[in-house]
Each structure stands twice: as C-alpha cells, then as structure tokens.
Amino acid sequence: MSQDFVLETQGLIKEFKGFTAVDDVNLQVQRGHIHALIGPNGAGKTTCFNLLTKFLTPTHGKILFNGTDITRQSPTDIAKMGMVRSFQISAVFPHLSVLDNVRIALQRKLGTSFHFWKSERSLDVLNDRAMALLEEVDLAKWADTVTVEMPYGRKRALELATTLALEPELMLLDEPTQGMGHEDVERVMALIKKVSVGRTILMVEHNLHVVSSLSDRITVLQRGAVLTEGPYEEVSRNPQVREAYMGSEAA
Amino acid sequence: MTTQVLNSRVNKTMNKTKLSFLILLLVGLVAPFAIYPVFLMKLLCFALFACAFNLMLGYGGLLSFGHAAFLATGGYITGHTIMQWGLTPELGVLAGTLCSAGMGFIFGKLAIRRQGIYFAMITLALSQLVFFLYVQTPFTGGENGLQGIPRGELFGLFSLEGNLPMYYFVLAVFVIGFAVIYRTIHSPFGQILKAIRENEPRAVSLGYDVDKFKLVAFVISAALAGLAGSTKSLVFQLASLTDAHWHMSGEVILMTLLGGVGTIFGPIVGAATVVTLQNYLSQGPLASWVPVILGLIFVICVLLFRSGIVGEIQKFMKKNFN
Ligand SMILES: Nc1ncnc2c1ncn2[C@@H]1O[C@H](COP(=O)(O)OP(=O)(O)OP(=O)(O)O)[C@@H](O)[C@H]1O
Ligand SMILES: [Mg+2]
C-alpha cells in the first residue's frame, strides 16, 4: 500500500549539551490526518515542533515535507512552504487589534510587506477576508478589541484564525486546549475538527479526551524516543503507554 | 459592518493626529518670530534625531546604543563635501544622509541577529570604532572638527546665510524626515515591524524574515539620524567629535524615553525638553551640573513616568475622555 505522507522525519535527534531531548524519531504524518503527538512532560514534544519548523536545528536526521528535504531551510521558508505552527503559550500580537492580528498573516500574500512608503490603508482590501476568518472562530464581534484584553480561550481561537489565514497545508498545534475551561475546550475541538477538512494537522495535546475524539493516529513520545504509534484504541491498550503516560492521567 | 465601525474609529484618530500635525506646522512656521531661530534649529535637528532613534526602539523594539555614529557621519560628510567638493547644501545633506544609511546597513548587518542587550553592546562597540576612526582620519579635522562650513545657496539659488531662510530649510528637512517616519510606521512594513516587536517568534512562524525587516528599519533610522546630523552641521557650520561621542548616543535615548518611547510626538517633546534645559542651565550658575541634573530627571522619569511625558498624557486622556 503506497501512502501519502505530508511530513516525514528520519532519525531525528536533538542534543542539548550532552542531554538528548529528541532521540532518533521517525515520524510519518499522513495527508489529511489529524495526528497527535503525546507524552509526559518533558518528553520532547515541543522540541520536536521546534525541529520540524526549524526554530531549532537538528543534531542529526532528516526532515521531509512533501518529499522534499527541508532540513536546511529557514523557519521563514518553512512557513512559506505551507507548514505553520502555533505555540504552547498563546502567540498573539497583544497590543494590536484582533483584526490586525489576522491581517498581519494575510498581508504576506500581497507582497507589499517591505513597502514602507505605502499607506496602511492599502491593507484594507484584506478586511473582508480577515472578518470572514474571525467569523469562523466566533470572534467577529471582538474585531475592534485590543487583543491583550481578551480572555485566554479567545486568544487561542484568534491564534488559530491567524494560522488559518495562511491556508497552511500542514498545521502544527502545540497544546491548543492547554489551560482552558471545559466549554472552551469543546469549542476549540469543534473548531479543529472544522478546519481539518482539506488539510493535515499535527498536534501536541495532553487532554486525552481531545486526543481520543480528534486524532486519526497517535505517536507516543517518552524521554525523547517514540514509545509506540497507532490509532487511539491500539495505543491506549499498550501496557507501556498506560504505565508511562496514561497511568497518571486517565486510569 | 464591524469593519466599518472600526474604520470610522481609525479615521477619527487619524484625523486627530493630522490636526496635531497642522497645528505643529503652523507653530513651526511662526516660531522664529518669537524665539531665537538658532535655538529652534538646534531643537528641530535633535527632534529629528530622536524621532529616527524612536523608530528603532519604539517600533522595532531594538535599543541601539550607537546612533551617535550616524549623526556624526552625516555632519562630517556634509561638511566635507561642501567644503572640498563645493556641493550645494541640499546635495551635501543628501550625501551625508546616504553615507549614514550605508553605515547603518553595515552596523545592521553585524548587529541585527543579536537580541536585547547584545544588540545594544554591538552597536555601542561599532560606534566607538567609528569614533576612534574619526579621531584619527584627517578628513574630520580631528579634535578641531570641521569649522566654518559654508551654508551656501540652496539649489545654487537661495542663500542660507541668514538665520531665517536657514530656519525654513531646517523646518522643511524636519517635516520631510518626520513624514517619512510617520509613513513608515503606518505602512504595510510598519505593521510587520509592530508584529515583530510584539511577538517575534510568531512573526517568524507566519513566514516573515524578521532580520530583513529589522535591517530595513535600521537603515531608515540611520539615514534619518544622518539627515539630522547633516542639517545640524549646516546650522552651526561645524562638524565635531562631540556628535560621535557615546554621550550623544546616550542623550538621544534620554530624549526618547523622557518624551515617550513608541509615541509619535514623544521624541519631539523629549528633545525639546532636553535641549531647552541644556540651554537655560548652561547659561546660569548650574552650568557644570547640567549632566547631573539631566541624569536626575532621567532617573525620576524612569521611576515615575514609565511611558514618558507624551505617554502619560495619552494615558490621562484615555482615562478621562474616553
Ligand atoms: N533550549 C533547550 N536547552 C536545553 N534543554 C532544553 C531546551 N529546550 C528543551 N529542553 C529540554 O528538553 C526536554 C524536552 O522539552 P520539551 O519542551 O520538548 O518537552 P515537552 O514534551 O514539550 O513537555 P511539556 O509537556 O511540558 O510541554 C526537557 O527536559 C527540557 O528541559
Ligand atoms: Mg511542550
């Protein structure tokens, strides 16, 4: 069976001064999947994301995006290629308006981002698209708000809208529901489900309810190495996983 | 619908700013009839210098401790090209500005990858290098500086020897420089610059090459600092090592913080305050205490009014009239 992988890593290793945070990880993310990366605190999930998006340089190993080797690309190039990440702590532009946050992402396609002589009104053509994106994450009525004044859950939704603005082929979400109340979690879950149509999502998540209901496939990391991989039912039956990870959180 | 509401609000603040510009411009036009023009020219030059610096710190989020180098380079190049090559004043100023921009590019290339204090240190080190270079090279006149730079004739037509025509030339330069900064801040480029200041990793993850944006901002800032230095050298007909000294880099930081970093009018207010204080104090019995007094004001300002004079006024207005 030939499979279509959007993202693939081969023997990915990251060492920090003698400490191996990511240890020989071979990851394969199938096109169209919601793929979850789970594991206990400090397992190396965020480090993995940093490697994939080149915020960190791997010590060894190869990263393939759509079959092309991207191990030597810059983080900017990777974003331009269609792999866009979010961050574990909400990543917004706090003192810009909610609408401006989304416009920043949309603006790149106009190709005028270095035009310091043009009026910012030339960006108004993006307003409709920006509003549509905010509509999609239920933030339309906040458009005018300075982002820092929004509640945490809304900020995460805004982050998602901003990421979506780039229409990424592959979205990397680092704990999208972390620190959220029950209601917000449900909303973000529905949202992820909705936006996953037509794209691939790789997501780090601690909340097993989210993982079990959203993901097509799960990779479990432990101390930097892959413990096991498979669909939720299979992974959750694995005794090692139960012991290492789930034992503490969802007995 | 919401977009329209938003636009109308944006337009309102835009109009307020535009109105303030107009009032300031009118004040600028009549000021030399009430106040000594040379003092006003000095003020405008430093205001432009501070505005240029503010573009980097307030909008780019980078603290440069080397802007004296650009101010001095502008002055020396303008003085040199006018005295040795016989350029007209506007061409001399242009030459000074371009050279500062070039130097800004080199500084930027070397420093922009560094964050925070390291950026400040590298810019300081580079500007010290430039300082010692200017002490040694003969074209700067060493300790004496370039003296007696002729103001010449604008476009070879209008004499700038008188203080009043010179003043209007300086005012025009300031308005142009300020307009460039204002437009830069309110441009597609400015939006990204603000995004980088707000959250750099996020800007990277959205596909923006942040180093390039910072570099462009740095070059614009250096060019305008050079423009200020060039113009100043015409006003005082002098280009000297004082401008290249690191004191000058510190002074522009003081002006900007005092007035309000990241506000459009803050650096102007800050520069006006510092220049006025220097002028008054240096004539009285406290002359030798000027640096101490400025330092004291600086400390008080940093401790009590974090957002500077203009910043505090804005906060006050927002609290009471919104
Ligand atoms: N820049 C760094 N330098 C040194 N060690 C690091 C660095 N970044 C991460 N680490 C270490 O690597 C290990 C993995 O960290 P990472 O943040 O990837 O874990 P994680 O799986 O995302 O955990 P969490 O669930 O808490 O977010 C940790 O032990 C961490 O201390
Ligand atoms: Mg993490």
Image (cartoon, coloured by chain):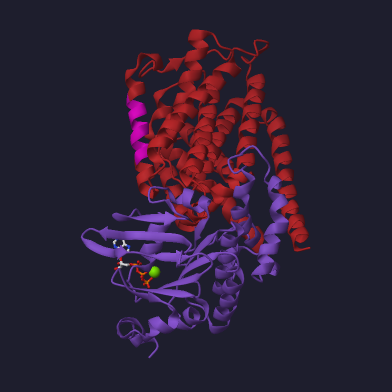
Chain colours: A purple, B red
Residue in the image at 32% along x and 25% along y: B132
Tell me residue B222's x, y (percent). Answer: 49, 33
Residue A94 on image: x %, y %: 55, 61
Q: Report the front residue among A37 and B290.
A: A37
Foreground of the two, A82 or B181: A82
Quadrant the C terminus of chain B occupies? bottom right
Please report the residue visible at 31 percent of the width from the left and 86 percent of the height from the top. A239
Q: Majority secondary structure of the magenta segment?
A: helix
Q: Is residue B28 left or right of residue B291?
A: right
Q: Is residue B238 above or below residue A153?
A: above
Q: Is residue B282 left or right of residue A14?
A: right
Q: Quadrant of residue A88?
A: bottom left
Q: Is residue A62 left or right of residue B310?
A: left
Q: Is residue B234 visible?
A: no
Closer-to-camera residue (B214/B226): B214
Residue A169: image quadrant is: bottom right
- From this view, report whether residue B277 is shown above or below residue B172: below
Going 63% across and 41% down the picture, which residue do you hit? B182
Check the picture and name the quadrant holding the N terminus of chain B: bottom right
* Vertical relation: B211 (above or below) B235: below
Looking at this view, name the residue that lies furthest to the bottom: A251
Residue at the extreme left of the image, as rendered? A18
Q: In the rendering, at what x and y percent does residue A62 appear? A: 35, 55
Residue A77: % across, % down = 48, 48
Residue B123 colored magenta? yes
Magenta-drawn segment: B122-132
